[in-house]
Structures are given as C-alpha cells and as structure tokens.
C-alpha cells in the first residue's frame, strides 16, 4: 500500500508540474510599434503625439510607407522620434530596445539612441545604411528612466526609415538555429522541461521498483 501510494504521489507531482505555468523569463515583448500607431503618428505628415509610446521630435515631415515611418524634409539631425520610456518602464527592471532603421538613399550614415531631453546623452551609435540598433535600458548601463529614448541620425539630415521598434523585458529571445523561425526556448521553459523529465524518471523508476518488489 505504501509503495503504491509513493508511485501515485510521484506521478501526481509530475502531472502538477506539467500543468504549472513556466517560470517568468526574459525576452517577453513589452511594447512593439504597430501599424495603427504609425498611421496615427504620420497623419498630417508632421508627426502627432497621439500614442502613449511615441512622441514627435523636431521638424521635417513624416509619412507611412508600408509598415515603416519615413522621415524626410529634415533640417536637423533631431528631426526624428522619441520612444516614451518615461512613465512606461519600471526603473528597477532591465529592458532591451531593438530598432531597425535605414537610410532612404542606401548611403551609410550614423544612427543613434540618445536621451530625449537635456543633457541629450548619446547611449549607443551604429554606422551603416541598414542597421539594427540594440541597447540595454538599464540604470547600470547609463540609461535614465526619467528621460525618453530618442532615435535619430548623428549630425546628418538625410531621409531615413524606421522599420520596427521593439522593447523587450530583459534580453531579446535567442535567434533560432533552424531556418523556420520560432526562436529558442526561453529559460523558464527549459527549466520546466528539465524538471518534468526528472519527475517522469522518478515516476517511472518508482513504478519499476514497485513491480519488481511485487514479483519478489
């Protein structure tokens, strides 16, 4: 009876573990710019502060092309856009901002993340015609959570596009090693699978143990 109960208990633990949600893991999307936000922002061509996550900066013109924002007729490098991180992110949490940007003419230029208000600190810069700006939003990394995050060119005024902006909690998901997308399993999912495998092994071992003892 005790052996049967032990087998049942271990099996029950296995079932409960499978039914329990995975541990919280980094890589979840906190915010991603949508086509609707882009539509509202570019309506009228000058940039509108109609969404809680994006804010117009400087002058020039804006237009929606596909699901991208085009910035043109610029006279300053800060004719651009701010991501409203002030009030939308928790200062005690680490995030990662990933933005895909490109020049309209295919020429190389320097894009950067910067502070959206004084002292306009530069956080991260990258040069190219088509780049992915990635920066960890963390106080230990110099990020000020009470300032918005600006995406702009550095010292140049050529036309450019923002194709996507995503803010992740923690680190972005690891890229999939296969060719079909989907990404790697999250840390919490991996831990859950490992624990489930241990529980299954224990349950199987207990069952074998009981069967052998009964035969003896």
Image (spheres, grey):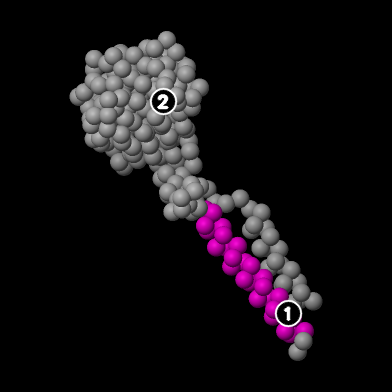
Q: Is 67 situated left or right of 154 in this image? A: right
Q: Farthest residue to the right: give it.
A: 1
User: Which type of secondary structure does the marked residue at label 1 adopt?
Assistant: helix
Q: Of marks 1 and 2, which one's residue comes earlier in the chain?
A: 2
Which is more toward the observer, 188 or 93?
A: 188
Please name the residue shown 52% across and 58% down the image. 191
Q: Where residue 154 appears, x then y in whole percent? A: 22, 27
Magenta segment: does it hold 140? no
**Quadrant assignment for the N terminus:** bottom right
Which is more toward the observer, 111 or 212?
A: 111
Residue 80 image-quadrant placement: top left
Please name the residue shown 32% across and 27% down the image. 151
**Crowdedness near tag 1: few (<14), some (14–19) or many (≥20) residues, C-alpha within 10 Å:** some
| Observer able to see residue 18 | yes
Q: Which residue is mark 2?
A: 68
Q: Is 36 situated left or right of 56 in this image? A: right
> Of tags 1 and 2, which is closer to the observer?
2
Which is the main secondary structure of the residues drawn in magenta? helix
Q: Is residue 69 above or below residue 168?
A: above
Q: Which residue is mark 1?
A: 210
For the record, the magenta segment spans 188-214
Q: Is 65 situated left or right of 141 in this image? A: right
Q: Is residue 79 above or below residue 132?
A: above
Q: Is residue 198 above or below residue 124?
A: below
Please name the residue shown 61% across and 50% down the image. 21
Q: Farthest residue to the left: give it.
A: 155
């Amino acid at each position: 009876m005790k052996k049967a109960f032990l087998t049942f208990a271990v099996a029950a633990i296995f079932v409960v573990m499978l039914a329990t949600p995975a541990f919280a893991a980094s890589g979840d999307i906190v915010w991603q710019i949508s086509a609707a936000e882009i539509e509202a922002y570019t309506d009228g061509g000058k940039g509108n502060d109609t969404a809680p996550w994006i804010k117009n900066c400087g002058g020039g013109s804006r237009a929606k092309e596909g699901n991208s924002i085009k910035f043109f007729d610029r006279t300053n490098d800060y004719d651009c856009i701010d991501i409203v991180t002030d009030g939308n992110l928790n200062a005690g949490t680490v995030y990662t901002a990933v933005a895909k940007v490109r020049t309209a003419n295919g020429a190389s230029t320097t894009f950067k993340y910067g502070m959206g208000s004084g002292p306009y600190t530069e956080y991260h810069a990258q040069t190219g015609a088509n780049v992915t700006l990635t920066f960890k939003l963390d106080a230990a990394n110099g990020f000020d959570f009470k300032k918005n995050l600006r995406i702009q060119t550095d010292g140049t005024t050529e036309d450019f596009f923002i194709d996507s902006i995503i803010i992740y909690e923690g680190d972005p998901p690891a890229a999939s090693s296969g060719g079909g997308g989907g990404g790697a399993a999250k840390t919490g999912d991996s831990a859950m699978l490992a624990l489930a495998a241990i529980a299954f092994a224990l349950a199987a071992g207990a069952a074998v143990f009981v069967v052998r003892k009964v035969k003896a």
